[in-house]
Amino acid sequence: QVQLVESGGGSVQAGGSLRLSCAAFGSAYSSYCMAWFRQAPGKEREGVAVFFTGGSNTYYADSVKGRFTISRDSAKNTLYLQIDSLKPEDTAMYYCAARPSGGYCTGSYWLSPVSYNFWGQGTQVTVSS
């Protein structure tokens, strides 16, 4: 069983930056695909970035390339999402997710919420114009 705890959300003005964190506890497998998702009110949960812990490979949704950066500190077992040039449309609850994997976690499959079996509770990001 893996527990994921997100933090770092908040209310910011457009153009600002935030760094979200996802601390992982209880990891039992050697490698995981870990991802950030977001869900705005009335919309479906959307995958934005994926990280393979076994090789540091990353994969991004086209809509966030250039503004979002996913990374991980293996010593702290913590996943990060750096969001720059924030826009009001980035307002959403941001979730961390994980699934054991021996692969590279690239491709649209890994941006789908059904591909993950461990989830955090989310951290809210609100961007004002």
Image (cartoon, rainbow, N blue to C red):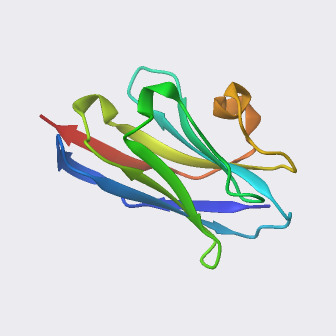
Of all residues, the one furthest to the left in this rendering is 129
Q: Which quadrant would the C terminus be assigned to in this image?
A: top left
Is residue 40 visible to us here?
yes
Q: Which quadrant would the N terminus be assigned to in this image?
A: bottom right
**81 horizontally vs 59: left or right:** left
Q: Residue at x 64, y 71 (%)?
A: 77
Query: x, y (%) of residue 36?
Result: 55, 44
Is residue 9 visible to us here?
no
65 or 87: which is nearer to us?
65
Q: Residue at x 74, y 41 (%)?
A: 105
Which quarter of the figure has residue 117? top right
**44 horizontally vs 113: left or right:** left
Q: Residue at x 38, y 26 (%)?
A: 41
**33 horizontally vs 17: left or right:** right
Query: x, y (%) of residue 10?
Result: 28, 54
**81 horizontally vs 33: left or right:** left
Query: x, y (%) of residue 28?
Result: 84, 67
Query: x, y (%) of residue 38?
Result: 47, 36
